[in-house]
Image (tube, rainbow, N blue to C red):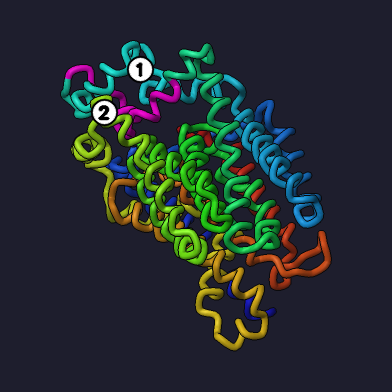
């Protein structure tokens, strides 16, 4: 067995052991102290094998992507690959969600007592609500916000308020919005990889982005929408620094500003943005004016909300207090600081674990290896830096203690950027039969798809 293959299998095996340990230790803790507040640790889920109307479609999408995905990704024109990736990812997410049926799988997800649609009627006067927003964050305050409204800046809730205002009312439309927009994140990641590394690596990553196990939660929470906004902010920044475009820079800045007002934790996307700026420093040197529209765009959303009366910093500090008033103050940090990483394995799959192992190998590659394949080595090193920045953001979120549990949805915006590491599992051999150090790419894709199908058919997820 080749040494590279053996190391890939070790990485995948270690990921499986991590999940197993998190499940066993978690069951013991939950059974004795009940301090985890999840029924099927490390996931917020319950055991409940079931089939649903989306089951046949999910299996067909998985089989089709495994069978034809690598070949189509290699051969299709780029302009056709992007919409196909979006469409297939959307079909994968919808079919997985519909395993639970339309009602439970999509229509009621955002209408439960913790979710955004519960407070639509309290935003009848939007400026007044924004001015008063922070007064309702803490438990014990008058008419305190439900958990998710209190836990996010108001742009998250305002999205669903505005959907309601234009006639797209109820949980069904909210779910369709999150899935349809969320699926575009795959396209944004591909565009970024192509701009910063090269097109070949983006094409090799495409099937893995489509069949991500993360799709189980992309169809059940607003975090899919947040992930897409953050991904497009990064993608437009990559296009700006590589194409020297002032327009893309301004648009990227606006989306980064919106990202920070959708979720406090997504300020960590700044680490991914920093990697993009580092990789695009030549473009910035040649056209330093790019920073002007970027910073101007970045100021638009914060300025708008601040003038409307919402204080982001005050709300964030109140959120920390609210977090420890609830389950966050009881859940044990000593368990979740590593069990969260098991959740990351479940949303990215064992192929990503092997891909991250190869990402590390690329970063420490000997100079002699780089000189023997200069073009490919440079592109791979650039992709490895981008993936590493996302991994760093995820680890910072983990160590912060503000992500104890439920990271299968909270970390979606970071997890999507780990999936391109799977491009390193593909060697440039015959189209449709590429092998990853002896393992066919389709075998890795099959493992990814099977994980998602098993999770959605065996568990009733809380999101």
Vertical order, 350 against 104 (above or below): below
Pick the residue in front: 124 or 67: 124
Residue 359 appears at what percent x and percent y?
A: 54, 69
Q: Which of marks 1 and 2 is nearer the N terminus?
A: 1
Relative to residue 362, is residue 267 drawn left or right?
left
Quadrant housing residue 32? top left
Query: Closest to the observer: 61 or 315?
Result: 315
**Vertical order, 142 against 330 (above or below):** above
Which residues, given as a range, are shown in magenta? Answer: 142-160
Q: Is 155 one of the magenta-colored residues?
A: yes
Residue 100: which quarter of the image? top right
Residue 21: in sight, yes or no? no
Q: Residues within 10 Å of mark 2 (few under 14, many from 20)?
A: few
Instruction: Using the image, tell me which numbered label, if any, was put on residue 250.
Output: none
Q: In which quarter of the image is the N terminus?
A: bottom right
Is residue 261 at all visible to an observer of this figure?
Answer: yes
* Residue on which disc 1 sits: 119
Q: Is mark 1 on a helix, strand or loop?
A: helix
Kindly give the residue lying farthest to the bottom in the view shown: 368
SS of the residue under disc 2 = helix
Occupied quadrant, residue 111: top left
Instruction: Give me the residue at 48% from left, 25% from top.
Output: 109
Q: Residue at x 44, y 51 (%)?
A: 23
Binning the other alpha carbons within 10 Å of mark 1 as few (below 14), some (14 to 19) or many (20 upward) gives some
Q: In the rendering, at what x and y percent does residue 416 appear?
A: 53, 50
Q: In this view, does 221 lie to the left or right of 7?
A: left
Q: How far apart are marks 1 and 2 (CA)?
A: 22 Å
Where is residue 110 drawn, in percent x and y? 46, 24
Q: How many marks?
A: 2
Q: Name the residue under label 2.
A: 307
């Amino acid at each position: 067995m080749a040494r590279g293959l053996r190391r890939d299998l070790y990485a995948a095996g270690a990921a499986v052991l991590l999940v197993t340990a998190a499940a066993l230790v978690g069951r013991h803790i939950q059974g004795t102290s009940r301090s985890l507040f999840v029924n099927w640790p490390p996931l917020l889920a319950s055991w409940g094998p079931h089939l649903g109307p989306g089951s046949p479609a999910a299996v067909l999408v998985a089989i089709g992507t495994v069978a034809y995905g690598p070949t189509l990704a290699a051969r299709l024109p780029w302009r056709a690959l992007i919409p196909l990736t979006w469409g297939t990812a959307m079909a994968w997410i919808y079919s997985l969600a519909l395993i639970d049926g339309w009602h439970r799988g999509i229509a009621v997800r955002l209408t439960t007592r913790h979710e955004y649609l519960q407070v639509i009627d309290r935003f009848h006067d939007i400026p007044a609500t924004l001015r008063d927003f922070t007064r309702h964050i803490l438990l014990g305050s008058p008419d305190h916000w439900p958990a998710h409204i209190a836990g996010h800046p108001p742009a998250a809730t305002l999205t669903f308020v505005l959907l309601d205002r234009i006639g797209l009312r109820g949980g069904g439309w909210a779910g369709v919005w999150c899935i349809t927009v969320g699926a575009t994140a795959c396209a944004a990641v591909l565009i970024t990889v192509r701009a910063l590394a090269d097109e070949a690596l983006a094409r090799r990553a495409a099937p893995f982005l489509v069949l991500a196990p993360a799709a189980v939660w992309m169809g059940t929470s607003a975090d899919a929408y947040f992930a897409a906004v953050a991904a497009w902010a990064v993608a437009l920044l990559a296009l700006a620094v590589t194409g020297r475009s002032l327009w893309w820079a301004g648009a990227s800045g606006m989306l980064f500003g919106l990202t920070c007002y959708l979720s406090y934790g997504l300020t960590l996307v700044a680490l991914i943005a920093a990697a993009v700026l580092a990789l695009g420093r030549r473009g910035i040197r040649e056209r330093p004016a790019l920073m002007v529209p970027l910073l101007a765009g970045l100021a638009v959303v914060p300025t708008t909300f601040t003038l409307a009366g919402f204080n982001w910093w005050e709300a964030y500090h109140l959120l920390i207090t609210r977090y420890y008033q609830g389950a966050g103050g009881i859940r044990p940090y000593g368990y979740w600081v590593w069990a969260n990483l098991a959740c990351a394995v479940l949303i990215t799959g064992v192929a990503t674990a092997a891909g991250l192992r190869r990402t590390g190998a690329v970063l420490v590659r000997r100079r002699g290896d780089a000189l023997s394949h200069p073009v490919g080595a440079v592109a791979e090193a650039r992709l490895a830096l981008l993936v590493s920045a996302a991994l760093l953001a995820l680890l910072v979120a983990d160590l912060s203690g503000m992500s104890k549990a439920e990271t299968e949805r909270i970390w979606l915006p970071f997890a999507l950027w780990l999936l391109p590491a799977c491009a390193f599992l593909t060697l440039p051999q015959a189209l449709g039969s590429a092998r990853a150090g002896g393992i066919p790419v389709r075998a890795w894709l099959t493992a990814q798809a099977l994980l998602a199908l098993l999770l959605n058919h065996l568990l009733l997820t809380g999101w």
